Image (cartoon, rainbow, N blue to C red):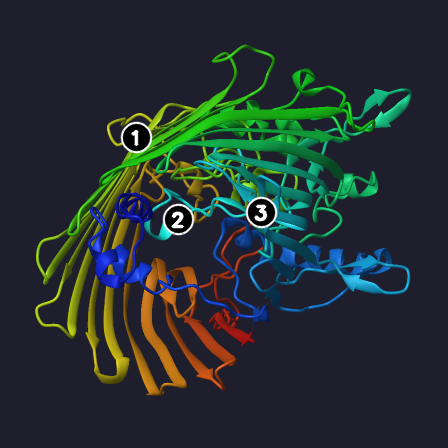
Amino acid sequence: MDAAAIINYRREVGQISSLRDLRSAPYLSYFGYRNTRNFIRFEPVQRAPEFHGHLLIRMHNTPFFTEEEDAATSAEASQLVNNQLSQTFSLGISDNNYPDVYTRFMGSYGNGIKVGYSYWHALDEPVLRSDLGFARLPRAKLYLGIENRRLGPVELRKLYLGNYALAFGEGVVMENTDFFIPRKSGIGFRKRFLGLTGDNSRTRQYKLTGAAAELALGPAHLFLFGSYDKRDAILNTTPVMINGKAHYPVNQFIVLDQRFRFAPADNFRRQAGLPWRDVVKELTYGFHAAYDVLPTSQIGITYYESAYDRLLRPNIEEVVDPGNLNQLIRADNEVFNSYGGPISDGENPIWGDALSFRRVYGVNFRTVHNNVALQGEYAELDKGEFLSGNPHALVLNAYIQYNSFYLFGLYRDYSLDFDNPYQRSFSNYRRFKRTVFERFFLLQSPFYGQLYSNNPQPQSERGFYFFSRYQVNRKFVLTLENDNWRRVADDATQFRLVGTLNYRPIFPLQIILRQKYQGRERENRLTTEYFESLEFRGTIRARLSRFDELSLLYMNSVTKFRPRPRLYYPITPGDSLDTANLAGNVTAPGEALGGSFTHNFNPWLKVRGFFGFYRGFFWNFEDTQFAVVDSERGALRWWVSLYSRLSNQLSVRFKYTRDVAFPITYFQTRDTNNVPIPPHDGRYYQAEFIQRTQDYYYFEMNVHF
């Protein structure tokens, strides 16, 4: 919106010659003005082309809290991982215990040439290498970009070879990333990059490898792209005969944390030679055409088609353990409506190996009028029906802005069978939430739980979202976030309400009060889908001299849900269950108290730290990391980070974290029949003193030149 205000003002006055002129632009917010002035010049700069670059090296051993992490850290699963690592050495993959390592380089020569390189090795993952004949190098991503060239009347704005990233409209048709961001609205901290750029991110599953270009002719814009790469997927164990040969179709595409060749714990697929890494070849091509109706209004069309060298046959029985198929619920409709089957079978005119395809197309628009912005995108997944007969997805949003107040509203409506692997539009939850894929212990391998936990697609939802910020005066700032939606799979009603009060009684002192109220099926007392969650966070922050800072944090939360009898187990076998409490757990409380500090020794050296206690579920920002932890009995957690600018071109950051859980000493000794062993004959049994302690480190180095 601020950019539109500047463009409209420049059209009216001819040119903007100073900061005073810029500040006079109608509907330009003060925040937008302060940010814009750091990125514009009023006189042309004549400078010879120079090569500049940025190198980032990041290393850590910090896992992010997820359900499948619990499975991966169990004794059984850890042994499976170790076995998997030992079996990969003969396959050209190095056995190792390396930490998570991410290396990224971005370079530019003048304004016309861009180069990039990135390599990511996940925690406890085998090192994958490419054999070049004369050398075996780790698999990395590379790109070369050419920008701002003229081809007669046509402007070649961008041309990228290698790995590139795309995003159009509201992310309904195309946005290739492996990572899910809840409530990705496009504003604030949920902004979306639009257009074409080189890809040096950590995306591996949905990376695009090939060529892409952006062309412009007056108010018309055209993006063309093509990609050919391999994808990770779970294959069915039941073959389909094609031309007399056994063919194993794709069940589900999957984003992997650790890209082993075979899924640990799935011995049947291992013995059958059915891996899950790089098992599907995908050819993707398409375009995005846009036209500027006005300088601040645009309409566009997006189309892409993907062809695969395997059939698509999603089958829940091929993923869930056969003994657990009776555990399916209504939310599993989202799994049953995955794209595939005979409707996906087909050839490709430019690729003879293609056996199936997926085709998605849509339209989008955006316009700005004064201080109001409107945007939207509508897309369909082609299943052979005419317009409006195919699975669809719709996102509409509006934004109104003043200097001290803004309001954002969004509506989304996703069909249950709109299964687009490149969809990254707004949603509160990721795809397959509450399905059997979330309950990894019911699957043929607990690592198949990544079908949910790593799924970047949005859940099929229908509902409204509002976000507002109002600065009452220099002391009070209020924000309100309200989301009401239905899960399409089972029509479950859900809501999320968050309010924040930011109060500054005096300039250096800041008091932040945040209250969240979230729930599902609150009015339905007959379903186990019900839950309600209340979370309060209070922060007192004191800003001191030289940008030093002290803060205190208190958090209290409680989550209520329906009783779960399946959690009950008799203490002693044979007890009468007539009067036993079969309710199980009905609530999950959480609490945290801690303090943090920031101290700048000088402009080149800074230290930050935190010390606190938590019990239950707790999330927090820790320097440059976001941590989510959980402890039933409570734990002490502290971290300290040191940041140093060794020179104008070189900076390093090191962080150490220690998490010490409260000890457990109440283990009861039992025999093989689960009967307690009482003291007898002068003997007694004593459990060990168990105290889980975890240590993590984080290292980062940045080089600019």
- In the image, taking residue 483 as reference, residue 132 lies left or right, namely right
In the image, residue 428 above or below residue 389: below
Q: Quadrant of the N terminus?
A: top left
User: Would residue 352 appear left or right of 151 to someone viewing this image?
Assistant: right
Pick whichever of labels 3 and 1 is earlier in the sequence. Answer: 3
Task: Determine whether 424 is above or below 645 in the image.
Answer: above
Q: Earlier in the sequence, mark 3 or mark 2?
A: 3
Badge number at residue 250: none
**Residue contact at pointers 1 and 2, CB within 8 angstroms:** no
Residue under circle 3?
165
Comparing marks 1 and 2, which lies closer to the viewer?
Answer: 2
9 over 676 or under it: above or below: above
Q: Which residue is mark 2?
A: 191
For label 3, the SS is strand
Q: Quote the CA–CA distance across marks 1 and 2.
A: 30 Å
Q: Which dot marks residue 521? A: 1
Which of the 4 image quarters holds residue 361?
A: top right
Q: Residue 261 versus residue 602: which sits nearer the camera?
A: 602
Neighbor class of circle 3 (other Cα within 10 Å; few <14, some 14-19, many 20+) is many
Q: Which residue is drawn at the image coordinates 32% and 72% (left, top)?
A: 612
Q: Nearer the viewer, mark 3 or mark 1?
A: 3
The image position of residue 594, as x and y in percent, is 28, 71
**SS category of the residue bearing label 2:** loop
Q: Is residue 548 visible?
A: no
Label whose residue precedes the other's in the sequence (1 or 2): 2
Does residue 647 lie above or below 509 as drawn?
below
What is the distance, in whole Å, between disc 3 and disc 1 at their CAs?
Answer: 38 Å
Q: Is residue 150 visible?
A: yes
Q: Amino acid at mark 3?
A: Ala
